[in-house]
Amino acid sequence: MSIQARLEELGIILPKAAAPVASYVPVAVHRDCAYVSGQLPFIDGELVTGRLGDDVSLEDGMAAARACGLMILAQLEAARIPLDRVERVIKLGAFVTSTPDFADQPKVANGASELMFDVFGEAGRHARAAVGVPALPLGAAVEVDAVLALRD
Amino acid sequence: MSIQARLEELGIILPKAAAPVASYVPVAVHRDCAYVSGQLPFIDGELVTGRLGDDVSLEDGMAAARACGLMILAQLEAARIPLDRVERVIKLGAFVTSTPDFADQPKVANGASELMFDVFGEAGRHARAAVGVPALPLGAAVEVDAVLALRD
Amino acid sequence: MSIQARLEELGIILPKAAAPVASYVPVAVHRDCAYVSGQLPFIDGELVTGRLGDDVSLEDGMAAARACGLMILAQLEAARIPLDRVERVIKLGAFVTSTPDFADQPKVANGASELMFDVFGEAGRHARAAVGVPALPLGAAVEVDAVLALRD
């Protein structure tokens, strides 16, 4: 099954890829690896802002992480890298805006991790680092970056 | 000397590799590189929790970083990658739970860096980023992830 | 034009590469990729310390990020990697010491991103993650690490 068909089966519609700003790019490809810039969580076009342990629930944090994951996929497509070329998701970095006593960054990050497994199956299993941060761009609740292996 | 013999010479017993959870994996190998997920510091089976600059001393922070490094090695072995296959430690990322006025993240991270040098010699010298964070999974004091080059 | 000539055209003098400490190295090369350790912002030999959203202005933060970028270039040269060998800047990781309500990490990180574009042109466009942190080594305001592709 193509990944596009799989997305449809899952009822997933990718968000509009956020426009590149400044002198960096959403996706840099070197040899067979795609490095995707840290993506923010947009749901229905609105940024999910706030802090886990304070004004963002665990459930909303997981949804935000999943939205970051969707934006990673959208950025690949916007960079003209069909998702069928993804051979493997290698690594995700998940940054979770957290109060000092919030300790469930892994559960939040699972929103992105499980999306990758849902979409790519075994090839979606990746290494991961999940950490708390005091603040993210635009007040976002979560940011996720990625390294993926591509086939020719 | 084999790395196993070197570990014995150093009196190092690797911890039990923490079980993978959710849809990510402890180690993702792509071509000749192993990406190891962020590892937490378990000493004698207990997680080192707390915050540098507050309730965790510099010495305990260094021991925690070393424990993260040991867990990185344990995860490689659990993924059936013998440590003798490590050609080079390429990069460590060290995240240190810190109060806003704690500035010794490099000394803390040295706990992991020096372990790699002890175990692998020159091949253990790596690039590194060490930063403070407000919170880590399960309240851990330190988290370290890694990229390593493997020989066939 | 050589990159050295380009630096002169831009009026850029690279800082003295900070000496390596402990058991890590400023630059680790594996195959055609150079991994550069997190670099701190020295301007005229003095570290830029402080916190965005508090005692460091946006403008000073951008200048600090640019200084981190200059130190990345200085470290490559100190590792005897001529800048003309840089085929592509692949990824920058920007860590910005931030108050919980500071949300302009991307603008700060642009100081490093725009430097790479100024120096390398299109080859300087990279993937990026920019996040807030509560504290950095030595009280630094910004830290930036990098992955670059090298030609033979």
Image (cartoon, coloured by chain):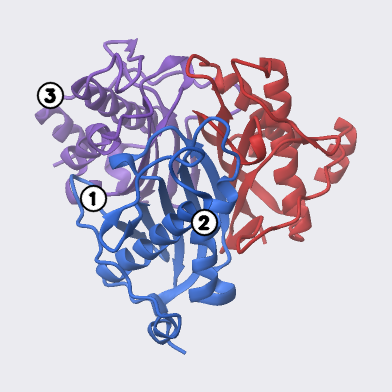
Chain colours: A blue, B red, C purple
In percent of the image, x 59 and y 37: which residue is there? B136
Question: Relative to C32, is C108 above or below?
Answer: above
Cα gap from disc 2 to disc 3, whole angstroms: 38 Å
Instruction: State whether residue A152 appears in this view.
Output: no
In the rendered image, which residue does mark 2 sit on?
A: A91
Circles 1 and 2 in contact, beta carbons < 8 Å = no
Q: Secondary structure at mark 1?
A: helix
Toward the bottom, the furthest residue is A1
| Residue closer to the observer: C101 or C35 | C101
Q: Disc 3: which chain?
A: C
The image quarter in which residue C82 lies: top left
Instruction: Please provide percent x and percent y for residue A22.
Output: 18, 45
User: Of the residues shown, which amino acid type is indicated by label 2?
Assistant: Lys
Relative to C34, B53 lies left or right: right
Q: Amino acid at mark 1?
A: Ala
Of residues C75 and B14, the one nearer the viewer is: B14
Depth order, front residue of B101/C123: B101
- Asked if residue C36 can be seen in this view, the reply is yes
The label on residue C11 is 3
Crowd band around label 1 with a 10 angstrom C-alpha radius: few (<14), some (14–19), many (20+): some
| Crowd band around label 3 with a 10 angstrom C-alpha radius: few (<14), some (14–19), many (20+) | few
Mark closest to the chain's N terminus, 3 or 1: 3
Q: Position of residue C57 (x, y in %)?
A: 22, 19
For residue C123, which numbered disc appears in the image?
Answer: 1
Residue displayed at 61% across by 38% down: B144
What amino acid type should be assigned to the residue bearing mark 3? Gly
| Mark 2: secondary structure | strand
Query: What residue is drawn where x is 68% and y is 26%?
Result: B111
The 10 Å Cα crowd at callout 2, few under 14, some 14 to 19, many 20 or more, is many
